[in-house]
Image (spheres, rainbow, N blue to C red):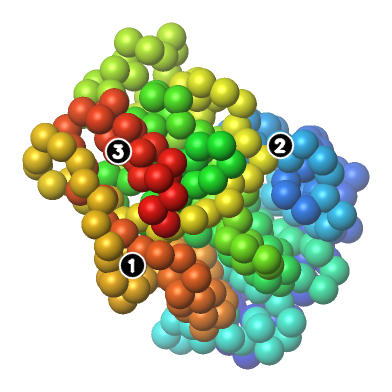
Amino acid sequence: MSSITLKTLPDYARHVLAAAESAAGDYHVTRKVHLPRLEITVRMGAGVLASAVEQAFVPAPVAGPGKCSIFVADPQIEGVPAPAGWGRAFFTPHAFASRLAEAGLRGNYFHDLDFWQFYDPQHGVGVQLMASADAFPPWEPGAPLRAFLHWEYAARGMRLAHAGTLGIDGKGILLAGSGGAGKSGTVVAGLLNRLDSVGDDYVLIGMAAAVTAYPLFATLKQDPEGFRRLGLDRRLTSYGPLNWQGKHQFHIGDIAARPMPSNLDITALVVPHISGGRASSIIPLSRKEAMIALAPSGIAQMPGERESGFRFFSDLTRLLPCYRLSLGTEPQEIAGTIADFMMRGTA
């Protein structure tokens, strides 16, 4: 298939899944990753993504009962076809996701690279098809296989949230907000001052009995200004070049005072913003404002499941009290304000 339309999309997805799976013995690298309630077997070629899968995840202490297999495929692997392109018809993500959902499948397509992701949730098999081993979007190594985790966990009633976390003694808050709001800096400030976290950028949320956040990725990011202001240039012995967003990328274990907890019981949703004042403060926030801070980026960055995503985040803001955090200028004072808030049980 040289070009794909909505009509041929399900057949193409099944063709790619079958081809990638039939070549299972020809992938150079196999990794098993234990995540909350899930074991993933990843088969791929050597390279940047293999290193990312090795380093980016936070291993769960106990292997989960669920299993899935992901094939990171490209035409250099025997039997794997070159990726097709999209046809001349207008492309909309919602129509794309809906067409696959009708066939019981999930998927994502990045036009610039003819980068395809397909997942069969019934059989727990997925494929990421690329034109070559390094033909992936620049954000992929920071949170590898994020789309597949989103689809698999969504089928289990859980959700990946674009949010950060901070906690103390097993209780925690969820930090939500758009880029530049101070979310990542707040997480780093807390970690540097002996608070816990189960992740920044993307965390797994479950709402079975209560709202619980679980770790998936160990990656932290900071722009150069925040990196220097927080003293990370002096604290970290080594760090790589700036990533595609112009940020330093490092691991939570590099700065955390203690091992990452296996989960945090979330007691509040907190929306930070940079106020310009010296002292931090926390005041109540309407559910509507909290929803605006939490849902759009979480839904836009997770392909498919749009309607269920809005329902999930609506339920989340209904279950949790919501607050606005006006950030001061000193990391220790910010962390102290958050710790006092959690220890008072305000939420």
Q: Residue at x 29, y 17 (%)?
A: 231
Residue at disc 3, secondary structure: helix
Mark 3 Cα shell of 10 Å, populated few (<14), some (14-19), many (≥20): some
Left or right of 326: which side holds 343?
Answer: right
Give coordinates of residue 256: x percent, y percent: 50, 24
Q: From the image, tell me which residue sits under label 2.
A: 59
Q: Nearer the viewer, residue 75 or 251?
A: 251
Q: Secondary structure at mark 2?
A: loop
- CA–CA distance in space, label 2 to label 3: 30 Å
Whether pointer 2 and pointer 1 mark residues with C-beta atoms closer than 8 Å, the reply is: no
- The quadrant in which residue 151 appears is bottom right
Contact check, label 2 and label 3, Cβ < 8 Å? no
Pick the residue in front: 263 or 87.
Answer: 263
Badge 3 is on which residue? Answer: 337
| Residue lying at the far front of the rendered structure | 344
- Quadrant (top left, top right, bottom left, bottom right) of the C terminus: bottom left
Q: In the depicted view, which residue is nearer to us: 56 or 19? A: 56
